[in-house]
Amino acid sequence: MTTAVAEPTVSGAPHSTGVMSNLHWLASDTATLTRRNLLAVTRIPEALFFSTVQPIMFVLLFRYVFGGAIHTDATSYVNYLLPGIFVQTVAFGSVSTSIGLAEDLQKGIIERFRALPMSRGAVLLGRTTADLIRNVFVIVVMTVVGLLVGFRPSTGVLSYLAGVLLILFFAYALSWGFAIVGLSAPNSETAQVMSFPLIFPLTFISAAFVPLSSMPSWLQGFATYQPFSVTVSACRSLMVGPASTGTGRSTSFWVVQSLLWTFGLLIVFIPLAIRKYRTRT
Amino acid sequence: MRLAIEVENLQKTFKGKRMVRALDGVSFAVPEGTVFGLLGPNGSGKTTAVRVLTTILRADGGSARVLGYDVQKKAALVRTLIGLAGQYAAVDENLTGRENLQMVGNLNHLPRSFVVRRAVELLDQFNLADAGDRPLKTYSGGMRRRLDLAAALVARPTVLFLDEPTTGLDPQSRNDLWEVIERLVGGGTTVLLTTQYLEEADRLASQLAVIDHGRVIAEGTPESMKADLGATVLEVGLPSIEDALRTGAILDTLGPHASLVTGTLVEVTVDNGPEAAMAGLRALDAEGIRPQTFNLREPSLDDVFLSLTGHRTEDEVAENGDGDGGLSPRQRRKKIRLEQLEAALPVATGELA
Ligand SMILES: Nc1ncnc2c1ncn2[C@@H]1O[C@H](COP(=O)(O)OP(=O)(O)OP(=O)(O)O)[C@@H](O)[C@H]1O
Ligand SMILES: [Mg+2]
């Protein structure tokens, strides 16, 4: 009796099951949802505020209020600070992955998606891709702000861009981690509350704002090699030179450390997020 | 006639802090091109059944097929054939109405040019043309609901699932929506709708199933169900509980249906409203009872429930808990009323003394 069914609706798209066709639709659906998520960012003034004004305030605070009391030997404090601010900004921003997913679950939009003949993976890919693109925008804004307050990257454009790519890649891995948080939370408020205790220690017990040598020695191990810090050090090396990290390590050492962490996090987070998405009822 | 939906012995238990048997062996069949109404009180399993049928949720046991395709084994194919408007409007607050519809069209893998045209068409059809380019944040609840329904229709589904589609709509929008559904069915679409309103099921559905605690407890056409029930409900409000109990006993004699006393309100289903009303008034007058209100009304889902299960939709009366298991609904109601009477008696005698 399965043969008697009329050709599905007006759909001009054949629902063939070939691998190429699946990939085509995965890309197409991801693009649709990425666009949708980015439109939301532009339409929620608070979200735009959160992702730009807050980091600018951090820059001003550390540059002009705390900065005078923090001593960096190899480079000016503003040069030391900005790579840290970049990584902090995208890390805080990745929390929005968890909030966005929790909200979609709560509002029942994901319920609708599950009944559509779309690619299963597009919901998570569309969310993380949108956050990646938003991060590009945020880093451009922060670079301009940095230049205005005296940030002077000195290693050339290519090296600077390599640093930016490293940050974006790291933030992308964090987004997958926060996707898991968002899929585990009963609502978006809880998702937010669950996210910050995870992100705060990583951001502040790190090389982002103060030289590692100023911390007590028992804290230095963690503060130096945790994923957030190695990415900050890698960016600092790439943007203002390896001496600026004050660690005596080379640029490639930190870049490799950061890439290892990022790949490791992605390998762990992606399957967990997909599993969580599949089993969430 | 071919079947658009076949459900056999469907089971689903939610395992959490509290085990909930949401579907406990539900079976029904819906012929192509008809409207099937799934009625039931809160928590009876309507949404769970819809979620299984729309491939959102996996059942634990039994089978469900849409147009002959198993919803679990052929989920991807089934999704190309169905449309769903869930119980709560699943629309994106931050997009405009048009963007919402186009997004759903794109995710249905429809050609872009068709999606653009279809969005215009649906906005018109649901009276949202003027609001089409406003973000949904500015929509009223009813507008959101209408957009949600429009989104379910973007891909011109062969089988449409509507979970309480008119809850929260004003009478005008509700009527408009009923007309839309009737037009769709005229065009060959099969519709499964869940509702809490007997009136809605009566107007749209050619076949009904009533579910309670995850089980089908009655099935039939709206006509047969109303015939079982009596055409009209006579509702009498009394000044005191004693009067209500006496009135209940009097109204029991009007016809085959037993009356129900809730506080000072007495209800009884009757076959001929005006005739029963006159007989009832005469009998009450003869007993010297002065009612405060006296109404005839259409039977509601609540009345269907009462007559099928012996409990009101909101009651969580334990089905077998107090040893009534063997009683028919009517007997059970009699028993409940006797208990009420006993409870009221000492008071009555006390006042007399
Ligand atoms: N995801 C879930 N997890 C746990 N229990 C659930 C879940 N979904 C539904 N239930 C339970 O299953 C039962 C049936 O729920 P369902 O939503 O199907 O009822 P319903 O008939 O749609 O009710 P309503 O008229 O209120 O919409 C309820 O007791 C509900 O609490
Ligand atoms: Mg429901």
Image (cartoon, helix red, strand yellow):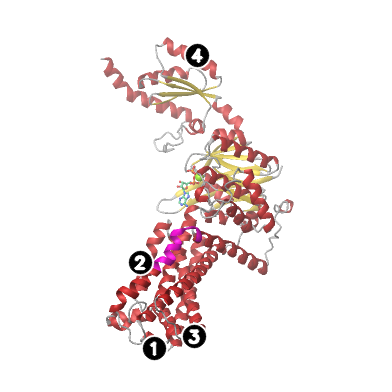
Query: Few, some or many C-alpha atoms within 10 Å of disc 1 (few <14, some 14-19, many ≥20)?
Result: some
> At numbered mark 4, what does the secondary structure look like: helix, strand or loop?
helix
* Tag 2 subunit: A
Identified at 37% across, 85% down, the residue is: A75
Based on the picture, tell me whether residue A48 belongs to the magenta stretch: yes
> At numbered mark 1, what does the secondary structure look like: helix, strand or loop?
helix
Based on the picture, tell me whether residue B162 belongs to the magenta stretch: no
**Discs 3, 2: same chain:** yes
Q: Looking at the image, is A260 positioned above or below residue B220?
A: below
Q: Residue B203: where, in percent of width, then height?
A: 61, 33
Looking at numbered disc 4 in the image, what kind of residue is underneath it? Ala
Q: Looking at the image, is B246 positioned above or below residue B23?
A: above
- Say whether mark 4 is within 8 Å of ligand 1: no
Q: Looking at the image, is B187 positioned above or below residue A203?
A: above
Q: Which residue is mark 4?
A: B279
Q: Are marks 3 and 4 in contact (CB under 8 Å)?
A: no
Q: CA distance from mark 1 to mark 3?
A: 16 Å
The stretch in magenta equals A42-55
Q: Which residue is mark 3?
A: A156
Task: Return the residue nearer the eye: B193 or B109.
Answer: B109
Quadrant of the rendered image containing residue A83: bottom left
Q: Which residue is mark 1?
A: A243
Q: Residue B196: where, in percent of width, then height?
A: 52, 38
**Discs 2, 1: same chain:** yes
Query: Few, some or many C-alpha atoms within 10 Å of disc 4 (few <14, some 14-19, many ≥20)?
Result: some
